[in-house]
Image (tube, rainbow, N blue to C red):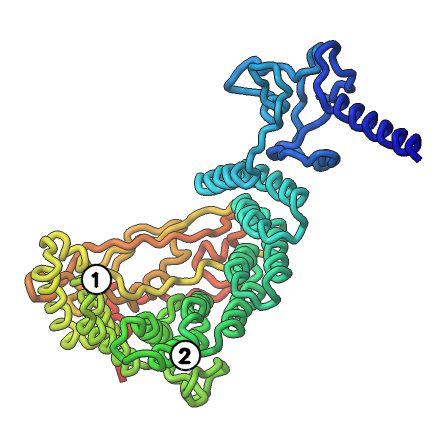
Amino acid sequence: MRIACGVVCLTVATMCAVAHAADAPSTSAPQTNPTPNLSAPATTTSATATSKGASPAAPAPNAPTASAPPAAANGKPPTAKSNDVPNAIDAMVPSTHDGATPTPAVVAPNEDMGNRMTHAILLLKSHEYADAESQLQVIVTDLEHQTSRYDPSLVTPYTLLGDALNGEGKYKEALRAYEQAQHIARVTEGLHTPTQVDLIYREAATLEAEGQVDKANDRMEYAYDTLTRAYGPFSPSILPGLYKLAAWYEHSSNIFAARGLYERAVQIVARTSSELDPAMVPALRGLAATYRDERFPPNEPYDPRQAQNQALLGSSAMPSVGEPPGIVVNRFGPGEAALIQVVKITQANPDAKPMDLVIAELDLGDWYLLFDKANRATPVYVHARQLMRTKAELSDEQIEAYFKPTVLYRPIPDGPPAPPPALRTNPTEGHVEVSFTVNDDGGIGELKTVSSEPDGMMDIKVRRGMRAARYRPRFAGDIPIAAANQVYRHTFVYYPQNQTPEAKAGQKSDGTKAAPEAPDDAPATPNSAG
């Protein structure tokens, strides 16, 4: 029994001694550990120390690599030749001065990635889209290998990658990047997360640039629907998205849908505060804008006879909230009421600046002038000028900059008919330049054609639009005055090789003569206020 116990004790002691000798550094002969393969590719991401016994991570496929010089004879990594440009291996395993075994440096990967993202953002801001795309592609690849394909940290790089591709005109690729970012946001935060709304707006802008206006409209509406799902239909949190969709509707000439949204905004603000809350101002101004655009469409002159026929026959346009079927062209009263309320809110707002009230009064004066109520517009303009001088402390030159005269409405005429896309070669810029006088009531007089190229192609359309234009008049003291020798130049694109001899002669394609142009002294189209 004693012999067996002694053998066991001797065996344990021997094993401990062997283990201690294995851990102790050798002083006589160098270790015969195999030399590491320094020529293996190293990823550009920062290395981190691995735990004892763990296998080192393999380099990410398709990631950028850096070649290192061969190892020195003593098995230590070589020292960089320049401290300014170290090689990849030295950056990961710094050398030591005391000859001890070097310890791998621990560099925070987030810090390195943040620097690369910042550089990519700077490239985007300087419109260097191709370079930004290349860098962001690498960032996305690195992050996918470090994390996963659906890690939340990929949302921002994919979004910026879409911006870079958009800047290069690669719209389909940009849409794919935005869709991937949106998909990751949905996977991590839920199908209806409001964080995806900004991405949806980017998709809509890209689709519009591609000419897919209907799909862009769908995305804008989906963004608003996402916000209402997240916050509720009457939450103040949806107001920024509501205004964005309303502006889109105005941009796409869907003024009745825009009006319904602005009315919803008025209801939302009224539920949580008073009628004098400054938050009401954007909604009221938007309402007035829809009434103005209904009465004064931006792309064609106002024709009272056509408007009367539309009112008699009805309209296929979608009526806004509270409106009976049919179109009501002359909406002077509701727009006036909205702008008067803006003035009252601004007057009651202790935080309003003097120019805030000035702008509110100028908007109201412009409304009166557009609807041919110059006798009501003039005192509003005079009071606004007094505020500029006494409250805002503007100089006479600064005040006159608001009355130089200033265009309030000038319809944009349609360009000349374009041939089929296959025949649209050699596009050329044409122009029509006219001179005119802005009368003291904001109307147009003494309209004359100064130059036209090609002669007669767009003269009639431009002159017809100018007769319907309205301007804020010039003032001399407190009195509006006429301003002569005003000039407007309209440019357009046409295709000269497709112009027929009949068109050059001022004839229609069917051989009949074009309608004669009205004389220069013809009165402007009246805009009665009804």
- Residue 268 sits above or below residue 124 on the image: below
Query: Residue at 56% of width from left, 47% of height from top?
Result: 157
Image quarter of the N terminus: top right
Residue type pointed to by label 2? Arg
Residue 424 visible (yes or no):
no
Residue type pointed to by label 1? Glu
Q: Tell us which disc is closer to us: 1 or 2.
A: 2
Please state which of residues 495 and 393 is positioned toward the viewer in this rendering: 393
Q: Which mark is residue 264?
A: 2
Q: In terms of secondary structure, where does tag 1 sit?
A: strand
Other-residue count near label 1 (Cα within 10 Å), few / some / many at <14 / 14–19 / ≥20:
some
| Lateral position of residue 205 relative to residue 341, left or right | right
| Residue 387, x across and y down, in percent | 11, 64
Outermost residue, front direction?
2
Query: Residue at 55% of width from left, 69% of height from top?
Result: 222
Q: Which mark is residue 446?
A: 1
- Residue 222 sits above or below residue 456 on the image: below
| Residue 225, x across and y down, in percent | 53, 72
